Amino acid sequence: MDPWYKVVTPREELRLGRSLDPSEFAVHLEQVVAGTAPKDYVEPEKFFARNYFSKALIDHCGMVLRRLNGETANTAPVLSLITQFGGGKTHTLTTLYHLANNGPAAKGFAGVADMMKETGLTEIPFAKVAYFVGNAWDPRPGCETPWLDIAHQLIGEKGWEYYGTSRNAPGTKMIGELLKAVGKPVLILFDETLNYLGRHPEQANQFHSFMQNLTVALTSAERAVGLFSLPASPTEMTEELREWQDKLTKVVGRVGKDLVANDASEVSEIIRRRLFEDIGRDSMRRSVSRQYASWVYERRDRLPAEWAQFSEEQIRAQFEACYPFHPSTLTVFQRKWQALAQFQQTRTTLAMLGMWISSAYREGYGKARREPLITLGSAPLWDR
């Protein structure tokens, strides 16, 4: 078995020993729409090449896109996002933005055809997308409120004919008429909503009314979906914001879906796409996995209980899915980071593992290490 660092190719920054900034893994939806985000996020071909359709992301895309296609079975007009490691709420919003914005052409992007097959989709619909990002939104002439801004995004200046210049939230009937006036499927994306309420407390009650009326209008509308991400870091929330979070969650939380990567193979795939340029030869991955699985299976009575319940073939599949990591390298951290309420699980974990890979990669060459997998023993615990 060849050492892992001679098989796989980490990102250039990691090979050169440069640390990764966690902010590099943060997606900002308003920057994606404006075209000012990095190309990996703005250009859909590049975005999907590094994207991974986890089970949770496939589930979300299926529910939203089927609804936009006019289907009602196993869909929902309103979805709220619950975030843990893997994908992330803004990443999900960005995925759906690119899919709806490109319509049928999106089928040619990496992973999309497989996602469609998994969800039973026959086509990706074109949709008119409006977005609201609470930490980036500020009033401007003609768009003094979020609902005026969304109306303008959907049908331009005609949107003002529906809402006028009123600072009061529009009613359900008026919102419904606006959605019909668009003349095509409608996707409305909300992100960082609580940040907006913290910065504009004078609008909080009207915004709450708008959210209530919008969810009712979406429920009765055809081919329209609202996707809301409400959670915020506990360290950033005052008691008043916690109360607003509870209120808004009750409004839009009728259909809430977790965005959790539940198993080590999904976590590994996300990490591979973000931290490695090339995963190496399939033959070596299979060889390493086969030999490790044989060793583990023969000694399963002396190993942790998590191994005893699987057949040798299942153990081999787990090693192959996690390559170049030993599965325990990821599962032990999944258990530990889930206990940290204030840990930003996606971006911080990617940055941490990036530093680990960088250190182990350079040490591997410098000391001619022989490990075929990245194991817990290679963690640079000496580097605080």
Image: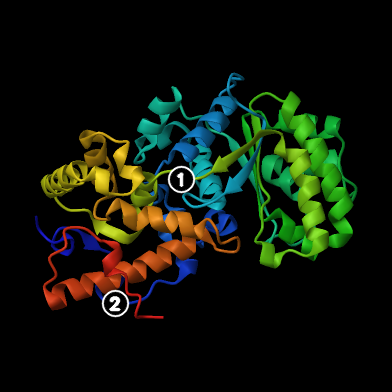
Q: Amino acid at mark 2?
A: Gly
Q: Amino acid at mark 1?
A: Ala
Decide: few, some or many residues near mark 1? Use Cα within 10 Å; few <14, some 14-19, many ≥20: many
User: What's the CA distance linking mark 1 and mark 2?
Assistant: 28 Å
The numbered dot on residue 17 is 2
Residue picked out by circle 1 = 261
Find the residue positioned furthest to the left: 1
Residue 142 visible within the image? no
Position of the C terminus, as image quadrant, is bottom left
Decide: few, some or many residues near mark 2? Use Cα within 10 Å; few <14, some 14-19, many ≥20: some
Q: Is residue 157 above or below residue 373?
A: above
Residue 311 location (% of width, % of height): 25, 33
Q: Nearer the viewer, residue 263 or 258?
A: 263
* Label 2: which secondary element: loop
Say which quarter of the image contains residue 181.
Answer: top right
> Between tags 1 and 2, which lies in front?
1
Say which quarter of the image contains residue 14.
Answer: bottom left
Position of the N terminus, as image quadrant, is bottom left
**Which residue is pictured at 37% across the width and 47% down the height?**
264
Mark sitting earlier along the chain (1/2): 2
The numbered dot on residue 206 is none
**Which residue is pictured at 40% across the width and 27% down the height?**
118
Q: Nearer the viewer, residue 145 or 334?
A: 334
**Which residue is pictured at 60% across the width and 60% down the height?**
341
* Label 1: which secondary element: loop
